Amino acid sequence: MSYPQTARWYTALLTCAMLLSSYAGAADKLAHVTILATGGTIAGSGATSTTTVGYTAATVGVDSLIAAVPELAKVADVKGEQVFQIASENMSNEHWLKLAKRVNTLLADPAVDGIVITHGTDTLEETAYFLDLTVKSHKPVVLVGAMRPGTALSADGPINLYNAVLLAASKEAIGKGVLVAMNDQIHAARDVTKTNTSTPDSFKTPELGMLGYIQGNKPYFYHVSARKHTADTEFDVSKLDALPQVDIVYGYANVSPVALNALVAAGAKGIIHAGVGDGSLATPVKAGLVAARKQGVLIVRSSRVGQGIVARNGEANDDELDFVASDTLNPQKARILLMLALTRTSDSKQIQRMFYTY
């Protein structure tokens, strides 16, 4: 072989080696995941190692949460940011707007591959659904919490956080909507709910089913949500500083219209009626709801039952009353969708369409 041929052969070999090296480097590159901390039990502490109730929530900062799980460095390039430090019963509309805007800003950055949000479990399902309707990206967003504080012998926060970061860093989670990672399970934000006051397996999707599992450092999806979410919704909160007032009225035996009338007088733009059974309306409250609708207040019939479809024109003539049926959304999630719907329209027919779309 002549010298020129040898030189060309050597150059080609070197180029191939460099390409193979770059491909290997790309394959080994970790996803960039930002953890947004908001407080909650996952950031809580108790008086003793056996304190699993009566602890103090929201005492541990995001840097300490990350430091407590060094294994995170093996699955993602992690950065932390303390957005709030509150117990989640104090989560407000203003908190949601701030959080959604921050998530959208981060996900617009090509360097960010996914988001994990640590959150108290009391309102975690509500925040998850709000973000499911307002995040404008198909990149993974995963909410995670804990049922026991980090100081407990049986703390579930560290493994839940590890699984959430693993999920947010995965390609499998892209385009699946906002997810909740708890107890080695993957749930859709729209359908998951807290079902127990204190046990680690509290988060479930009782009727429609969870989406999958996390096992052996890998997410496994078996179902996906058929409802529109994230970048495919019509909601935009980028210029909003407040949300319309929407309140929930609970149905029960011997119910009176006092609470309903007080909420309408206080300026409610929408009312979610958490009715008994299939969203049934007791006579005293029905009269108040009809009067409120005539004043321009949007009325959504939901149910306190927790499962099943609230049938339009089932327990009430929704067409005649100009009410909206909540489909399968529980009252607290129906409230979120109605708030966002009212930022777009006050047409009840369009709002009913949204309840069947999202």
Image (spheres, rainbow, N blue to C red):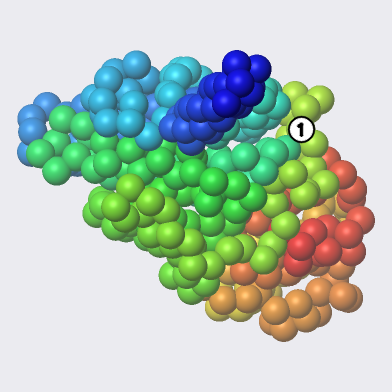
Percent position of residue 192, x then y: 49, 58
Bin the neighbour count of mark 1 within 10 Å (Cα to Cα): few under 14, some 14-19, many 20 and up. Answer: many
Say if residue 68 shows up in the picture: yes
Q: Work out whether 357 lies above or below 39.
A: below
Q: Work out whether 40 lies above or below 343.
A: above
Percent position of residue 181, x then y: 41, 48
Q: Residue at x 27, y 41 (%)?
A: 159
Say if residue 115 shows up in the picture: no
Q: Secondary structure at mark 1?
A: loop
Which of the two residues, 219 or 348, is positioned nearer the viewer here?
219
Q: Work out whether 29 lies above or below 269.
A: above
Disc 1 residue type (three-letter) = Val
Most extreme residue toward the front is 2
Most extreme residue toward the bottom is 314
The residue under label 1 is 237
Q: Left or right: 82 with respect to 282?
A: left
Q: Left or right: 19 with respect to 162?
A: right
Percent position of residue 82, x then y: 46, 18
Q: Residue at x 57, y 26 (%)?
A: 1
Percent position of residue 215, x then y: 31, 55
Q: Residue at x 55, y 40 (%)?
A: 141
- Which part of the image, by quadrant, shows the C terminus? bottom right
Quarter holding residue 102: top right
Q: Left or right: 56 with respect to 232?
A: left
Q: Left or right: 165 with respect to 275?
A: left
Q: Residue at x 77, y 49 (%)?
A: 232
Which of the two residues, 55 or 145, is positioned nearer the viewer here?
145
